[in-house]
Image (cartoon, coloured by chain):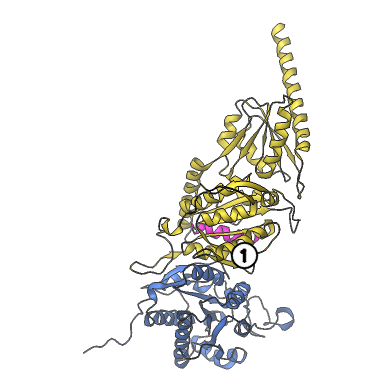
Amino acid sequence: MEKRIFERPRYLKEAEFHYCPGCGHSIIHRLVAEVIDELGIGERTIGVPPAGCAVLAYNYLDVDMGEAAHGRAAAVATGIKRVLPDRIVFTYQGDGDIAAIGTAETIHAANRGENVTVVFVNNGVYGMTGGQMAPTTLLGQNSTTTPGGRDVIRDGTPLDLSQMLVTASGSAYIERTAVNTPKNVRRTKKALTKAFKTQMQGLGFAMVEIISQCPTNWKMGPSEACRWIDETMTSVYPLGVIKDRVGDL
Amino acid sequence: MSDKQLMRGSHVIGEAAVRAGCRFYAGYPITPQNELTEYMASAMARTDGGTFIQAESELAAINMVIGASMAGARAMTSSSSPGVSLKQEGMSYLAAQELPAVVVNTMRGGPGLGNIAPSQGDYFQATRGGGHGDYRSIVLAPASGQELADLTRTAFDYADQYRTPVMILGDGMMGQMMEPVEFPEPLDPSRLPDKGWRLDGAKDRPSRVIKSLLLDPAVEEELNWKLVRKYEAIKRTLAGAERFMTEDALVVVVAYGTAARIAKGAIKALREQGVRVGLFRPITLYPYPDQFLRDMSRTVRDFLVFEMSTGQMVEDVRLSLEGRGQVHFYGRPGGIVPTPDEVAKVLHALYQREKLGELSQKKEMGHASAS
């Protein structure tokens, strides 16, 4: 007798992803959809997608979604959540969207303790526009705007937004995870669940920063990209809980 | 109707907004409109369901308004010229996503940091879109305390009706002056028609998306023409203007807002001397009341456009008249507020030149018919 042990989550539409082979977005989208389903919040969830590779997230996630201009998701989410406080509002943003052009809006949403959930996908590069430097590009890492590699004099060092948000009094739960190994995928799902639960219980601003592989712009194969995260990226962006004021939920 | 109250212009806008069902305001301090932001802070605090946020920037504020509007609230933000520049990205997104919102610009001297004195230098920004892309906002130009009250209410109604941003274009003088104002009864936002497009969670219905990314040019083109059809409907129904002493006028001043008030003073004074001048005052700057102006050119040949700028609305006057009549311009930019006397001098001089011209034309015709 057949038993279904794995299927498309309820909150993922029947649409073929446009993401590159080996891209972390595919995994992260699925995890977000699973968490929304398991928490039973799909009918009252509103998402705000980014400008970036995931700009088409609304083609995949089957919840109400309101597009924001590049970087503005935290402000748009603030507007939605203040008007509809009993709905679950999340943003889904890349590293440029949240930590370059959207830095001010993100810091201030956290500082005000806006009760929203932020999914921060960190792949250390600007994917959609063809591989330019991101705030999280590593020193020495190649990109189309850092010929010879990111240089500390010209470009500054990689920015750690999650650390910056620790001092914002309104941020309640921040964790950095990855999706490059099965263990990390499971950890990411736990973190996302906690981040949504933080909002459901009205405990403040919650964010999960997910290190995500970008084989295309890192110019690596998918397996190599997964290894590179463990070998190199996590020494600058270590995985783990960064702030936790909420405890076990 | 409630009793008349003496109230500062900035406060009038705030009170009118609350009575119009506004329940979300985000703003950032900037002179000369801080009284409005401060009024909304206390008004939203004492209103059920009201939200006030002092945002981290004017840019954040307009994006919060976008979110609030997506959720179905009547939402407003306000600023003055340099801050309104920061909102232009948001205006483009509001128009493209067909979201209602009210944006108040209390204009000050510019460009750049400028000064805090009243000016009308943002006419182009307000009426030509201001942000990127092919779109327009409805622009209303109050010229009195009562109009601030009435047009604020109208702004929210138009925004919802047409699903488009509406700008209330005032200036530092409008914001500060105190006049008696009568407000309509407050309306209950929960009794407004339900917005069937809003984002409130996909319960018992398919999920919705509000976006403006249309990668297929064919689809993007369709949206652009859809917006054009909307603007054409707006043009057909909403254009408004006031005519003051224009029936027998030889020269008509065209001015809006504070400039129109100043011009009225000049016109009244000149009329007492038997000088036949009048005022055409657009109340909607988009849609521009071009047909009314064209109609007037059947009997009026000379128009003096008077603006507190180096000349922006004057282009719309020329466009409206399509070559009929003669368009003259007088302006003072940078925050200078001319007196009615100054405007009267300019107006009178023009009137006399045109009257002389008229007389010498008649003389020539007289000679011609005599010979």
Q: Is residue B298 above or below residue A115?
A: above
Q: Quadrant of the C terminus of chain B?
A: top right
In the drawing, does residue B334 fall left or right of residue A123? right
Q: Which chain is yellow?
A: B
Q: Residue at x 47, y 70 (%)?
A: A56
Percent from the top left, x then y, of residue B64? 55, 66
Asked if residue B92 is positioned above or below residue A40 in the image, the reply reads: above
Question: Is residue B4 in view from this perspective?
Answer: yes
The image quadrant of residue A229 is bottom right
Drawing shade for chain A? blue
Reply above or below: A5 against A71: below
In the displayed orientation, state which residue is furthest to the left: A1
Q: As drawn, which residue projects farthest toward the top?
A: B371
The front one of A27 and B61 is: B61
Dot 1: element: helix
Q: Main secondary structure of the magenta part?
A: helix
Say left or right for B367 vs A43.
Answer: right
In the image, residue B94 lies in the stretch drawn in magenta: yes
> What residue sits 62% from the left and 38% below the top?
B281
Could one spot residue B136 in this view of the protein? no
Q: Chain of mark 1?
A: B
Q: Which residues are magenta?
A: B85-98
Q: Position of residue B194 (x, y in %)?
A: 40, 58
Residue at point 50% right, 74% down? A91
The residue nearer to you, when weighing A154 against A6, is: A6
Which amino acid is tagged 1? Leu
Q: Is residue A176 magenta?
A: no
The location of residue B8, given as percent across then percent down, is 65, 52
Q: Nearer the viewer, residue A169 or B62?
A: A169
Q: Which of the 4 quarters of the picture holds residue B327?
A: top right
List the residue tagged with mark 1: B59
Horizontal and vertical percent position of residue B24: 53, 63
